[in-house]
Image (cartoon, helix red, strand yellow):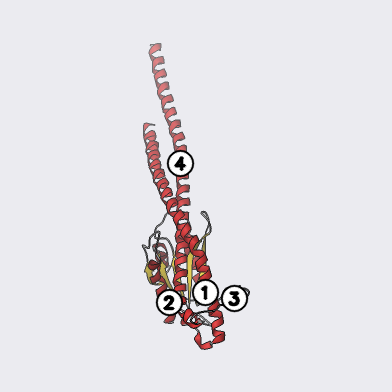
């Protein structure tokens, strides 16, 4: 019985130490989550407006000058090679988020049935793609919890180079879209070639571009690609911190529940041990009395 008490006590101390660690990680993730959420939400209006303006240019410019189509707008009737920018966390302990992203990427590759050339942003996605035997042409890790626009530009530039060189016919972004603290949705977004949104015709506006549409398009299109990748990265970071905070909170709650159960078992075992010792004493006294 004393050995059992020592074992239970050691387990209680171990779980208590784990609960303190997960609680600390929850607080750290919560502080990072707030900043990441603000960054992601602040970038959405600009990214959406830029997407619409460039979609307008991409749709109307060929009607004016069919030869003016920018290389980044090149359409392929039967794309054979697909480029994927796969954005995932660098670290674990983010609940089921990395697994959800991996499943969505695998599903996308299977559905397309095409050869994939992947750009991995984050160690979790890189490791998954390598295990799956996919062609990882570039990898980026260690971008941190608050990356700058300049930190993400190389990712977009690799994708642009792949597309303009003809190595891929399409480029898609796979990332976790931040919905709220408990919901992060894996999204697949077609980055290249640029396509007008479905509501473009209904919301069309006769913009006046200076100096001309061709120059504006050539200047803004690469910036648009970079901005979309940057916005997706901010969304992914907000999703990661939210998922990590929720996961650590659940881990802390589970550890506390387990400590309660072990404490109850410890008290029960201790009570049984004391009762056994009392019975031994009473039995000894009774034996002496009989003598």
Figure check: 286 above or below 42: above
- Mark 4 burial class by Cα count in 10 Å: few <14, some 14-19, many 20+: some
In the displayed structure, does residue 201 sit left or right of residue 58? Answer: right
Figure check: 101 above or below 287: below
- Rendered residue at 43%/63% (across/down): 88
User: In terms of sequence position, does the residue under pointer 2 or pointer 1 come before the other?
Assistant: 1
Q: Which of marks 3 and 4 is in front?
A: 3
Residue 246 numbered tag: none
Check disc 4 and report the residue beneath it.
256
User: In terms of sequence position, does the residue under pointer 3 or pointer 4 come before the other?
Assistant: 3
Check disc 1 and report the residue beneath it.
112
User: In terms of sequence position, does the residue under pointer 1 or pointer 3 come before the other?
Assistant: 1
Cα separation, mark 3 vs mark 4, equals 59 Å
Q: Nearer the viewer, mark 4 or mark 2?
A: 2
Residue 205 numbered tag: 3
User: In terms of sequence position, does the residue under pointer 1 or pointer 4 come before the other?
Assistant: 1
User: In terms of sequence position, does the residue under pointer 2 or pointer 3 come before the other?
Assistant: 2
List x then y, in percent, for residue 181: 51, 54
Tag 4's secondary structure? helix
Residue 160 numbered tag: 2
List x then y, in percent, for residue 13: 38, 39
Q: Residue furthest right?
A: 202
Screen quadrant of the N terminus: top left
- Mark 3 burial class by Cα count in 10 Å: few <14, some 14-19, many 20+: few
- Rendered residue at 55%/86% (across/down): 64
Check contact, mark 3 vs mark 4: CB within 8 A: no
Cα separation, mark 4 vs mark 2, equals 50 Å
Is residue 103 in view?
no
User: In terms of sequence position, does the residue under pointer 4 or pointer 2 come before the other?
Assistant: 2
List x then y, in percent, for residue 287: 39, 15
Q: Which of marks 2 and 3 is in front?
A: 3
């Amino acid at each position: 019985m004393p050995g059992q008490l020592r074992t239970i006590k050691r387990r209680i101390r171990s779980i208590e130490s784990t609960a303190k660690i997960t609680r600390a990680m929850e607080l750290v993730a919560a502080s990072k989550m707030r900043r990441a959420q603000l960054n992601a939400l602040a970038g959405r209006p600009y990214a959406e407006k830029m997407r619409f303006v460039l979609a307008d240019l991409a749709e109307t410019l060929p009607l004016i000058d069919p030869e003016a189509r920018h290389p980044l707008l090149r359409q392929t009737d039967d794309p054979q090679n697909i480029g994927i920018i796969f954005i995932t966390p660098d670290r674990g302990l983010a609940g089921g988020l990395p697994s959800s992203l991996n499943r969505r990427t695998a599903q996308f590759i299977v559905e397309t049935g095409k050869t994939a050339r992947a750009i991995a942003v984050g160690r979790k996605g890189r490791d998954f793609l390598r295990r799956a035997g996919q062609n990882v042409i570039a990898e980026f890790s260690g971008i941190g919890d608050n990356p700058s626009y300049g930190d993400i530009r190389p990712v977009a530039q690799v994708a642009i180079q792949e597309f303009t060189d003809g190595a891929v016919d399409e480029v898609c972004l796979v990332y976790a879209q931040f919905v709220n603290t408990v919901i992060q949705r894996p999204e697949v977004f077609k980055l290249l070639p640029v396509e007008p949104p479905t509501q473009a015709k209904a919301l069309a506006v006769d913009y006046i571009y200076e100096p001309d549409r061709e120059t504006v398009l050539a200047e803004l299109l690469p910036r648009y690609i970079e901005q979309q990748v940057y916005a997706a990265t901010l969304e992914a970071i907000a999703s990661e911190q939210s998922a990590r905070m929720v996961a650590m909170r659940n881990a802390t709650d589970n550890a506390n529940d387990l400590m309660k159960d072990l404490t109850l078992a410890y008290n029960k075992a201790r009570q049984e041990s004391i009762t056994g010792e009392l019975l031994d004493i009473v039995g000894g006294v009774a034996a002496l009395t009989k003598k």
